[in-house]
């Protein structure tokens, strides 16, 4: 990579960190996408960021399609580069943004998957409450469904973040944003049992000293991947054959709230969405949910 290109990228990363307050995960994707484009520039004998024009961008877009990348991945890469060049224009490093006239490929609109209440009930009943790991798994499942939090937010929770007196948790979300999320009586009971009877044994038996809520079998901090593995093992105990992932519980949380009369603004706040448009997709899911419920239970459906 050219020194000038490297300096421009570093300036952009600092902008994302300081001004945009992006998460390390988001910044990593920006870096990957931009460095990949720098490699394309080298292969095309383009020696300066200012030399890139709309024709070069179209060639790059064609290359991405030839690699048979998913439309979502291509859209993200183009969006990353558009933001990068917009920043360079703002800083007067280059004169024009060649990505400004390039349209991002339309994405297929797929409704998020969710569980019906009967399916969740089977999942909750499958939890083993007689072992420390069983208590942890039940608390994890109850909390994810009760709050709709992201798996990355869940693994960051510390004991001091939970206020059992008013049943709320301080959640540290995307972009270091914080919000308080309530949880119900089932999650309350499961968390208390896990902390008093499960977590203390898992941590104590292995000599670990930390304040994170969820731990692995060795007493260390539970990772995002660890959560996914736990949920998949729980799902394998059922005969339905469905797949489970943390976001499916988040989708179920939002869908069930809206189906039972919650207003969209409240659901937006609980989910930690910065924009209401991110929450609106659940209105479509709710319509499907209500239709299936009607067809299943109405005597003359």
Image: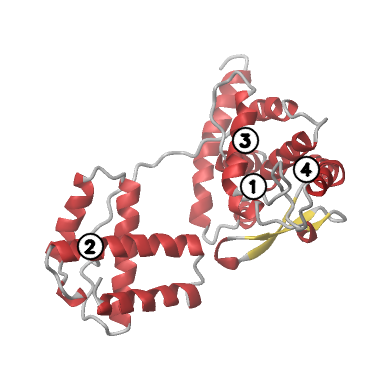
Mark 1 or 4 closer to N-term? 1
Q: Pointer 2: what residue?
A: 39
Residue that appears at 24% across and 75% down? 2
Q: From what the image shows, is residue 51 above or below residue 61?
A: below
Q: Pointer 3: what residue?
A: 231
Mark 2 or 3 closer to N-term? 2
Residue 226, percent across and down? Answer: 61, 43
Please tell me how crowded label 1 is: few (under 14), some (14-19), or many (20+) other residues with Cα within 10 Å.
many
Answer left or right for 272 relative to 211: left
Circle on res. 148 = 1
- The label nearer to you, 1 versus 3, is 3
Query: Which secondary structure, mark 3?
Result: helix
Circle on res. 187 = 4
Residue that appears at 55% across and 25% down? 292
Query: Which secondary structure, mark 1?
Result: loop
Residue 116 in sight from this viewpoint: no
Farthest residue, direction bottom: 92
Rounded to the nearest angstrom, the CA distance separating label 2 from label 4 is 50 Å
Q: Quadrant of the C terminus?
A: top right
Mark 2 or 4 closer to N-term? 2
Residue 166, percent across and down? Answer: 84, 56
Mark 1 or 3 closer to N-term? 1
Mark 1 or 2 closer to N-term? 2
């Amino acid at each position: 990579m050219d020194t000038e290109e490297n300096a421009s990228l570093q300036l952009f990363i600092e902008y994302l960190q300081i001004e945009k307050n992006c998460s390390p995960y988001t910044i990593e994707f920006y870096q990957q996408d931009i460095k990949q484009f720098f490699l394309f520039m080298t292969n095309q004998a383009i020696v300066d960021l200012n030399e890139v024009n709309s024709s070069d961008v179209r060639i790059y877009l064609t290359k991405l399609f030839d690699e048979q990348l998913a439309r979502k991945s291509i859209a993200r890469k183009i969006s990353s580069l558009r933001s990068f060049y917009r920043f360079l224009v703002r800083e007067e490093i280059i004169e024009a943004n060649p990505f400004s006239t390039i349209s991002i490929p339309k994405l297929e609109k797929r409704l998020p998957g969710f569980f019906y209440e009967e399916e969740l009930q089977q999942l909750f009943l499958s939890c083993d409450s007689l072992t420390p790991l069983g208590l942890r798994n039940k608390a994890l499942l109850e909390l994810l469904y009760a709050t709709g939090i992201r798996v990355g937010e869940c693994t960051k929770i510390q004991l001091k973040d939970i206020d059992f007196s008013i049943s709320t948790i301080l959640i540290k979300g995307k972009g270091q944003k914080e919000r308080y999320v309530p949880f119900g009586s089932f999650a309350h009971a499961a968390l208390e049992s896990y902390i008093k009877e499960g977590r203390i044994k898992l941590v104590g038996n292995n000599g670990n000293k930390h304040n994170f809520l969820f731990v692995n079998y060795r007493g260390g901090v539970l990772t995002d991947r660890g959560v996914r593995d736990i949920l998949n093992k729980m799902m394998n105990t059922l005969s339905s054959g469905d797949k489970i992932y943390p976001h499916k519980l988040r989708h179920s949380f939002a869908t069930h709230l809206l189906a039972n009369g919650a207003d969209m603004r409240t659901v937006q706040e609980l989910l930690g969405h910065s924009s209401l448009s991110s929450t609106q997709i659940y209105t479509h899911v709710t319509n499907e949910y209500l239709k299936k419920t009607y067809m299943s239970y109405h005597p003359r459906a």
